[in-house]
Image (tube, rainbow, N blue to C red):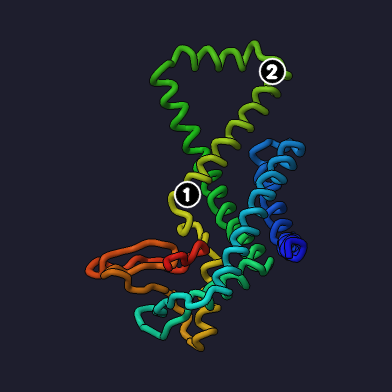
């Protein structure tokens, strides 16, 4: 029995290598950017983060398997847009989620979506760099005009070509880091403004609509009424007299039993 359980654990863990490979390939260039081309740093960090994600995915799929096999699971009311279209059991929801997270193609689509959003944020950061540098020089001149004048004189009369090269490299690294950090902040504040979407949630919604044979392509919202409150699969709750939340499907769905 123990050997059978161990064999299943190994099989499940090995089946996720494609998802882990996608995560590694997505993380490596990002870490190279922050490590300024340091391949050793990028490789070690990408490997470590991928290993953590692999273990997290493995445990999550195990939890989904338990929910699929659970008897007398709860039911979720399904709304597409503002229209009630039926209900599904938590076991059926977990089965759809398991299929989505077991498909490496969903990870590829999510990685491409994140890359596109990051590209748009970086381009916006690059476009704003000249203006930011101009205002920085103005502020420097107002706060400490003497040091600015001294620096310009040093650049003109004292600095050697090697000094200028070192200064240019340091400036490029600093600008790159600032642009990368600013882009991450912009993505964190307004990720949807740059086109970042949760492809896992979208895929789960497609699976729910297919199960209920609903042709409409609007947002899928799952909920159920518990003690006078509307409960969502991700554990959020709201009073029935409050406006509905805007998102319901979530990869961390459903342990309210």
Q: Where is residue 154 shown, x and y percent of the image? A: 60, 13
State whether residue 53 appears in this view: yes
Q: Give 153 or 142, whichever is nearer the viewer.
A: 142
- Mark 2 in CB contact with mark 1 (< 8 angstroms): no
The N terminus sits in image quarter: bottom right
Q: Is residue 213 above or below residue 63?
A: below
> Could you say which quadrant of the image residue 46 lies in?
top right
> Could you say which quadrant of the image residue 115 lies in?
bottom right
Q: Is residue 204 above or below residue 83?
A: above
Residue 163: mark: 2
**Residue at x-position 69% and y-position 36%:** 36
Q: Where is residue 99 shown, x and y percent of the image? A: 62, 73
Left or right side of 239 for 223: right
Disc 2/disc 1 C-alpha distance (Å): 37 Å
Q: Which residue bears the numbered disc 1?
A: 188
Q: Is residue 247 above or below residue 30?
A: below
Q: Give 110 or 99, whichever is nearer the viewer.
A: 99
Mark 1, other Cα within 10 Å: few <14 / some 14–19 / many ≥20: few
Q: Give 167 or 211, whichever is nearer the viewer.
A: 211
Q: Earlier in the sequence, mark 2 or mark 1?
A: 2
Which element is circle 2 on? helix
**Residue at x-position 68% and y-position 21%:** 164
Q: Where is residue 138 shown, x and y percent of the image? A: 43, 27
> Could you say which quadrant of the image residue 247 lies in?
bottom left
**Residue at x-position 34% and y-position 63%:** 237
């Amino acid at each position: 029995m123990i050997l059978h359980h161990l064999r299943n654990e190994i099989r499940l863990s090995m089946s996720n290598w494609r998802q882990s490979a996608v995560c590694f390939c997505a993380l490596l260039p990002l870490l190279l950017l922050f490590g300024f081309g340091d391949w050793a740093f990028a490789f070690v960090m990408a490997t470590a983060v991928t290993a953590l994600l692999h273990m997290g995915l493995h445990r999550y799929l195990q939890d989904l398997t338990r929910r699929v096999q659970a008897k007398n699971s709860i039911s979720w009311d399904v709304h597409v847009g503002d229209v009630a279209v039926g209900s599904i059991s938590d076991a059926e929801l977990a089965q759809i989620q398991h299929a989505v997270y077991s498909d490496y193609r969903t990870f590829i689509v999510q990685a491409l979506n994140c890359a596109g959003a990051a590209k748009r944020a970086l381009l916006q950061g690059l476009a704003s760099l000249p203006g930011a540098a101009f205002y920085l020089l103005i502020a420097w001149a107002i706060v400490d005009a003497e040091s600015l004048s001294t620096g310009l004189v040093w650049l003109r009369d004292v600095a050697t070509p090697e000094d200028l090269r070192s200064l240019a490299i340091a400036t490029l690294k600093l600008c790159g880091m600032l642009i990368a950090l600013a882009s991450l902040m912009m993505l964190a504040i307004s990720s949807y403004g740059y086109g970042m979407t949760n492809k896992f949630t979208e895929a789960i919604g497609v699976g729910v609509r297919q199960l209920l044979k609903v042709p409409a392509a609007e947002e899928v919202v799952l909920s159920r009424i518990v003690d006078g409150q509307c409960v969502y699969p991700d554990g959020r709750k709201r009073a029935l007299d409050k406006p509905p939340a805007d998102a319901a499907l979530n990869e961390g769905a459903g342990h309210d039993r």
